[in-house]
Amino acid sequence: MSRALFPIGKNFIGMLFLAAAFTSCAPAEDTRPGQPVAHRQAAFKAIMEEFEPMGAALRRGDFPSDEFLKRAERLFALKDDPWPYFGADTQYPPSKAEDRLWREPEIFAARRDDFLKAAESLRAAAKQRDEKSAREAWKTVEESCRACHKTYKRR
């Protein structure tokens, strides 16, 4: 009775299939010079890392005003970072932006301006240390994000 050095069974083949499937599902890398898509995605991620904890605290009924203000200040400091990376030549994988974003530059600019104003209002509300004002301002930022993503972000 000889045994194969590397026995291939159903489990091995199944694991090989899963590994191949997961490898092919990996997100595309931004290999273009300057990596504009990767930079704008990283900028949005940094904004979300400040924004989402504020929302989580508000949903819990918790309002740590000092922490909320710190996050609002950081979000305000980051608010301009993604926009320079929406150049006309940045519609390629791994971009999740819809083509219509570049066909509707005036509308997109208005949505961007809504977000910038909302971020400024959030910072002002956080400075007041009033939960009701902060909650309303946070919701306005959230709505500005949703409006833009609903129109311009590919799912």
Image (cartoon, rainbow, N blue to C red):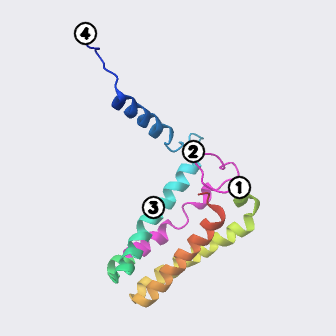
Q: Residue at x 57, y 47 (%)?
A: 94
Report x, y in % for residue 100. 72, 59
Name the residue nearer the viewer: 136 or 35: 136
Numbered disc in front, either 1 or 2: 1
Q: Write down the residue under mark 4.
A: 2
Q: Earlier in the sequence, mark 2 or mark 3?
A: 2
Amino acid on which the number 1 mark rests in the picture: Asp
Q: Write down the residue under mark 2.
A: 34
Q: Label 3: state its secondary structure.
A: helix
Mark 3 Cα shell of 10 Å, populated few (<14), some (14-19), many (≥20)? some
Image: magenta residue range: 70-98
Q: Earlier in the sequence, mark 4 or mark 3?
A: 4
In this view, 106 is above or below 28? below
Q: Label 4: state its secondary structure.
A: loop
Rounded to the nearest angstrom, the CA distance separating label 4 from label 3 is 58 Å
Report x, y in % for residue 29. 53, 42
Q: Residue at x 44, y 33 (%)?
A: 17
Q: Label 1: state its secondary structure.
A: loop
Q: Write down the residue under mark 3.
A: 46
Q: Write down the residue under mark 1.
A: 99
Amino acid on which the number 4 mark rests in the picture: Ser
